[in-house]
Structures are given as structure tokens and as C-alpha cells.
Image (cartoon, rainbow, N blue to C red):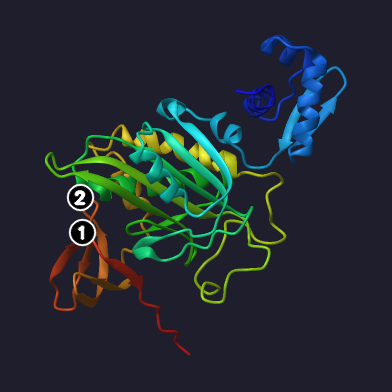
């Protein structure tokens, strides 16, 4: 790791507190002048660093980077190796290639922008530069492939918990993998993988998380304007770049939940965060399209719906859309 990267990592780990140039120089075995040059370069890269006499340096805001993600990681997520890119076609696609080449569990791809971001059913995920969090993580757990919905559901819980912890916002989950703020989508989870057919287990899973953090400079495209939103709006923006903290909190929560996946310890939180129960929904999948009332989430993380004839059905796959409520004049 280069000295500039080590310096940035140390500033990130200081969590907004000052750290002296002398301490940094001693830590890395270099001169204070070398540290000053690194800090100057980091400022030129866009990181906001304050310098105070007899105190040292403090990172107050910065651009998204691998170091900004790695520094706050906790628990099992500390094994993650983060690869940062300014622009990729798709973080999931890139990480899938890395997985086929033998990348280990915990490999993470983070991008500042995606040119071909994807959601469920090959739909595009709008991924403009500098406003969203676009992250994919590689998992190599010995799980039955049918348990992918556990993984997607637990990842959705980790994402919602990260938003609450970092931003103080309460996010709802729309089965199985969409994040809602109010009645608009602000993010989603996409899980893809490779199956070992002989064992019936997943060779690997690539889990992608896309989140609209800041409002796009030019607004959302017309086809998304009425359905999508962001965590923050013009006039209520965060004081500093928080995408690195969100990524770190998400990864830390994800690996915590993954370690307890077979026990389904994520399930109570997933039920509590679910925003569909009690609402009319249109369900599609398996060649069927029907309308029903969402009842709840069962012990297999399936959405239970009640059909108009009173029968209940547990959905294992497909797409669910909320039926708009009729307004009474």
C-alpha cells in the first residue's frame, strides 16, 4: 500500500479527530515532510482535510475511496478487500468476472458511477456519478441455492440498518429486495451466483446493493421521476460525503447476518421493516398475474398473500407491485 493510501486510511480511522503529522510519520517510518506531501496530494484529489497547529490533520469530508470503506469495517467484514473504480459498466458484472478468476470471499467492488447498472429482471438501475452508492460483495458460503432469498432478505435488512445508523432515516423493505423511503424506491439488492449442480450448493454469490444517496444533479429520468427518490433532497444535504460510511456499515451488518443465516436471525427485523402487509398488491411470476392482499412474511422469508377467495399463498419468487389506493373526493 502506498504512503498516500496509508495516510488516508489512518485519517479515516481517526473518525474526524485530529492526528498529528508527527504521529503519522512515526507510524509509517517516514519524515513529517513526507506526510505533508501526502496530505497535499489528498487535498488535490478532493479530500477535505483540516490542519491545525499543535493538533495535526483531520479528515472532515472526502471523495469515495477504498480506504473510506475499509477503515470503519467491523467484525467479520474486516476481511473485505475493497476495489474502488471511478466508473464501471456494472459492479456485479465486474465482480462476477473476478469470482470466476478465483477472487476470495470478501472481495468488494465499489464505483462512483455505473454505465450499465442493473436491477431485477435485467432492468437498468440509474447510477449517475457521485450521488449514489454502488457496491457488490463476493460471498462463497456453502448454502443451498434455494436459500438465496435468505441472503437477499438479510442483505436488505443490513442495508436498512446502515441507513438508519448513518443517516437516522427509517427505510421500509418491499419484498424481497427493494428499499423504500415513504412510497418511493431509493435502492435495491441484486443477488446473482453460480451453482455447483452436483452438490446443489452455491459456488459463489455476488450481492449488489444500489442506493440513491444524493439527488442527481439533473434529476431522475422521466420514467423514474414518480417512482424513485433519494435519501437526501436539495436543501437538506449531509455536511460531508457519507457514502463510505454507508458502505462500511452495510458490509459490517451483512457479514454479521450471513454468519447467522441458517438460524434466520435476520427474520424478525425483516418482518418489522416490511412495508407490504395490509396493502393490496399485484403479483406476477410463473406465467400468472393476480391481485391479492399482502398478509406478512412467513418463516421461510416468503411473502404470504390472501387471494380474493380467501385462500392464502406463500410467494417464493416473482414480482410484487403495490396497487395505488383510491382517493376519496
Task: Indicate the position of residue 233 as horizontal and vertical percent values.
Answer: 65, 61
Left or right: where 201 falls relative to 261: left
Q: How many marks?
A: 2
The residue at 37%/45% (across/down) is 96
Task: Indicate the position of residue 68 as horizontal and vertical percent values.
Answer: 60, 35
Label 2 crowd bin: few (<14), some (14–19), many (20+), radius 10 Å: some
Check disc 2 and report the residue beneath it: 300
Vertical comparison of 202 with 296: above or below: above
Q: Quadrant of the N terminus?
A: top right
Vertical comparison of 1 with 323: above or below: above
Q: Are marks 2 and 1 in contact (CB under 8 Å)?
A: yes
* Mark linked to residue 267: none
The residue at 26%/59% (across/down) is 296
Task: Indicate the position of residue 38 as horizontal and vertical percent values.
Answer: 76, 26
| Separation of residues labelled 2 and 1 (CA atoms) | 9 Å
Left or right: where 7 falls relative to 300: right
Which secondary structure lies at badge 2? loop
Q: Residue furthest right?
A: 53
Task: Indicate the position of residue 223 as horizontal and vertical percent values.
Answer: 51, 76
Check disc 1 and report the residue beneath it: 316
Which secondary structure lies at badge 1? loop
Looking at the picture, tell me which residue is in the foreground, 173 or 75.
75
The residue at 22%/67% (across/down) is 305
Q: Quadrant of residue 178?
A: bottom left
Q: Quadrant of residue 251?
A: top left
Along the polypeptide, which appears first: circle 2 or circle 1? 2
Amino acid at each position: 500500500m502506498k504512503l498516500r493510501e496509508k495516510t488516508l486510511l489512518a485519517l479515516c480511522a481517526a473518525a474526524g479527530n485530529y492526528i498529528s503529522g508527527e504521529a503519522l510519520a512515526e507510524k509509517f517510518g517516514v519524515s513529517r515532510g513526507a506526510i505533508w506531501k501526502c496530505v497535499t496530494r489528498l487535498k488535490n484529489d478532493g479530500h477535505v482535510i483540516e490542519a491545525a497547529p499543535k493538533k495535526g490533520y483531520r479528515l472532515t469530508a472526502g471523495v469515495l475511496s477504498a480506504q473510506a470503506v475499509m477503515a470503519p469495517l467491523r467484525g467479520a467484514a474486516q476481511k473485505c478487500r475493497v476495489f474502488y473504480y471511478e466508473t464501471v459498466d456494472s459492479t456485479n458484472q465486474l465482480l462476477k468476472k473476478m469470482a470466476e478468476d478465483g477472487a476470495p470471499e470478501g472481495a468488494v467492488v465499489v464505483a462512483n458511477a455505473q454505465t450499465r447498472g442493473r436491477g431485477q429482471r435485467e432492468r437498468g438501475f440509474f447510477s449517475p456519478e457521485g450521488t449514489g452508492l454502488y457496491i457488490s460483495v463476493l460471498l462463497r458460503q456453502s448454502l443451498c441455492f434455494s436459500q438465496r432469498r435468505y441472503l437477499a432478505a438479510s442483505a436488505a435488512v443490513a442495508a436498512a440498518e446502515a441507513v438508519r445508523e448513518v443517516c437516522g432515516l427509517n427505510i421500509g423493505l418491499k419484498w424481497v429486495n427493494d428499499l423504500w423511503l415513504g412510497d418511493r424506491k431509493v435502492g435495491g439488492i441484486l443477488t446473482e451466483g453460480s451453482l455447483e449442480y452436483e452438490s446443489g450448493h452455491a459456488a459463489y454469490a455476488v450481492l449488489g446493493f444500489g442506493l440513491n444517496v444524493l439527488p442527481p444533479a439533473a434529476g431522475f429520468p422521466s420514467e423514474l421521476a414518480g417512482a424513485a427518490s433519494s435519501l437526501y433532497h436539495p436543501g437538506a444535504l449531509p455536511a460531508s460525503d457519507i457514502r463510505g460510511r454507508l458502505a462500511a456499515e452495510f458490509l459490517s451488518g451483512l457479514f454479521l447476518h450471513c454468519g447467522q443465516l441458517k438460524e434466520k436471525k435476520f427474520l424478525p427485523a425483516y418482518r418489522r421493516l416490511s412495508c407490504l402487509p395490509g396493502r393490496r398488491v399485484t403479483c406476477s411470476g410463473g406465467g400468472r398475474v393476480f391481485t391479492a392482499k399482502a398478509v406478512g412474511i412467513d418463516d421461510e422469508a416468503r411473502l404470504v398473500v390472501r387471494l380474493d377467495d380467501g385462500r392464502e399463498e406463500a410467494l417464493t419468487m416473482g414480482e410484487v407491485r403495490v396497487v395505488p389506493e383510491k382517493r376519496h373526493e
